[in-house]
């Protein structure tokens, strides 16, 4: 087998293996459905402390993302992702054996480290594998398939976690640890794309200082000098911040229903799982939507999100209490959740194709920081609104979405204007002739 044949075989195999690998490493499975209950009921934390741990994770990720990117810049992506798994292991071990808030804080710091490594290096596995066999056009389809699988697994593990938690509160955490170990073993099947990026060439003459400088990867400062990159990051931060509220709202509403006795606690896991299945479907087939509507997909999603969220608030406030009210609100909230994943996948694709840099790891680091800052700021704002309105889901939705509508639409217009004006020949990135794995 020649080197070219080996490259084609192993890189195409990487592409086939990648969706499953992404699905079990994109986040920690098993734990999120019951983690707040675990912290409060088993470990003795207050509910505010349990919520504060999310903020700790967000803050740590913002601080370490750029240093992690620089430290791991020359490390091969598969090897780096294996190290990222250790961050997940640390989080789970601190959660299992920790007995105070400080130890749980260290655990969430480990989780932030693992997540930053995966965001920066995990995508490089797919990027470099596709580029090695000239299949760049398949990025959105393959990545979307991986995200879809993640939501399917999260739905299944959400249901299992409710039963495991009732059997033993520690069982979901041990289940998550088993999944992380499987991910570590599975990574052994993936070949380092870097091995197949270069060919045997003649020795080139020694480069001058200016030539070496010109060939160096773009710095963070140079990347941020692009107006298009700035508009992309601002839009991504706002949409991530606003649309991340849907899961918080969904959990708040389900908690209210279970506390009131409107639904049994076991149904919580099934409803949450159904929401994740719907998100899996939207992630799996988002490329077909983008194929039809192109950049207009972003406009459709933002307007649909605003309408659906306000509609859920209207039903909550004005419709009399009944089973039909509960069904309508849950249905509307599930639809808002289904919008989030395709929007994020579209942005990843635009980031990869349209940004004026090939240093994607640094771009994803900046994107991660922007997302986390957007989430942290808007989450704090939404939490304050809930406090003001005494956890009234409807009124908080009205004010939050009403205030955020204008900056969302302005950032959307700025982003699309930059996208279509400066990259008119590049922005139509969806191709009909996808490669079949």
Image (spheres, rainbow, N blue to C red):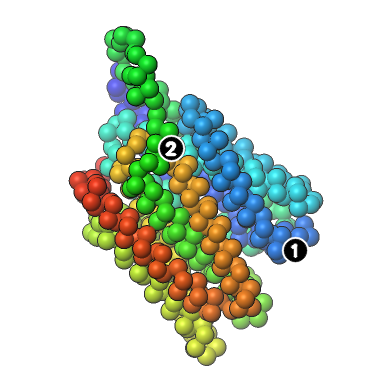
Spatial distance from mark 2 to mark 1, Cα to Cα? 42 Å
Please say if 34 is above or below 215. below
308 with respect to 266 (left or right): left
Image quadrant in which you'd find residue 239: bottom left
259 with respect to 23 (left or right): right
Q: Earlier in the sequence, mark 2 or mark 1?
A: 1
Residue 46 screen position, x and y as percent? 75, 63
Q: Residue at x 49, y 77 (%)?
A: 398
Please say if 97 is above or below 374. above
Residue at numbered disc 1? 46
Quadrant including the C terminus: top left
Quadrant including the N terminus: top left
Image quadrant in which you'd find residue 31: bottom right
116 with respect to 98 (left or right): left
Q: Could you say which is closer to the camera, residue 272 or residue 128? A: 128
Please say if 151 is above or below 21. below
Q: Could you say which is closer to the camera, residue 152 or residue 136? A: 136
Q: Residue at x 72, y 53 (%)?
A: 170
Residue 22 screen position, x and y as percent? 47, 44
Residue 297 screen position, x and y as percent? 30, 61
Residue at numbered disc 2? 221
Determine if residue 289 is in view: no
């Amino acid at each position: 087998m020649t080197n070219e044949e080996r490259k084609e075989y192993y890189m195409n195999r990487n592409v086939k293996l990648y969706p499953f690998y992404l699905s079990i490493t994109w986040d920690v499975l098993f734990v999120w459905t019951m983690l707040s209950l675990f912290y409060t009921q088993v470990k003795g934390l207050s509910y505010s402390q349990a919520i504060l741990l999310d903020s700790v994770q967000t803050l740590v990720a913002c601080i370490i993302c750029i240093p992690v990117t620089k430290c791991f810049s020359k490390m091969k992506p598969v090897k780096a992702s294996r190290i990222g798994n250790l961050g997940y292991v640390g989080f789970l071990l601190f959660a299992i054996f920790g007995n105070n808030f400080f130890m749980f804080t260290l655990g969430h710091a480990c989780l932030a480290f693992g997540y930053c490594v995966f965001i920066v290096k995990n995508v490089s596995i797919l990027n470099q594998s596709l580029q090695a066999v000239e299949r760049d056009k398949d990025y959105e389809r393959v990545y979307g398939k991986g995200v879809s699988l993640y939501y399917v697994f999260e739905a299944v593990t959400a249901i299992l976690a409710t039963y495991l938690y009732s059997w033993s509160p520690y069982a979901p955490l041990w289940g998550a640890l088993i999944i992380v170990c499987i991910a570590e073993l599975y990574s052994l099947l993936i070949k380092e794309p870097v091995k197949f990026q270069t060919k045997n060439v003649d020795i080139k003459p020694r480069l001058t200082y200016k030539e070496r400088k010109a060939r160096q990867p773009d710095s963070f400062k140079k990347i941020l000098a692009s107006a298009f990159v700035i508009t992309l990051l601002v839009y991504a931060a706002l949409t991530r911040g606003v649309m991340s509220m849907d899961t918080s709202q969904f959990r708040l509403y389900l908690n209210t229903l279970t506390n009131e006795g409107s639904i049994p606690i076991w149904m919580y896991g099934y409803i949450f799982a159904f929401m994740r299945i719907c998100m899996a479907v939207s992630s799996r087939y988002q490329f077909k939507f983008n194929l039809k509507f192109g950049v207009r997909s972003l406009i459709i999603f933002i307007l649909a999100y605003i309408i659906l969220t306000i509609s859920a608030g209207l039903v909550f406030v004005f419709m009399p209490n009944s089973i039909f009210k509960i069904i309508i609100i849950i249905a509307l909230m599930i639809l808002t959740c289904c919008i989030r994943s395709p929007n994020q996948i579209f942005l990843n694709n635009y980031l990869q194709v349209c940004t004026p840099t090939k240093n994607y790891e640094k771009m994803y680091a900046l994107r991660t920081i922007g997302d986390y800052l957007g989430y942290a700021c808007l989450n704090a704002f939404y939490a304050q609104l809930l406090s003001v309105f005494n956890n009234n889901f409807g009124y908080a939705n009205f004010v939050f979405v009403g205030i955020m509508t204008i900056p969302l639409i302005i950032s959307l217009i700025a982003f699309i204007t930059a996208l279509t004006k400066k990259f008119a020949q590049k922005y139509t990135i969806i191709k009909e002739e996808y490669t079949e794995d």
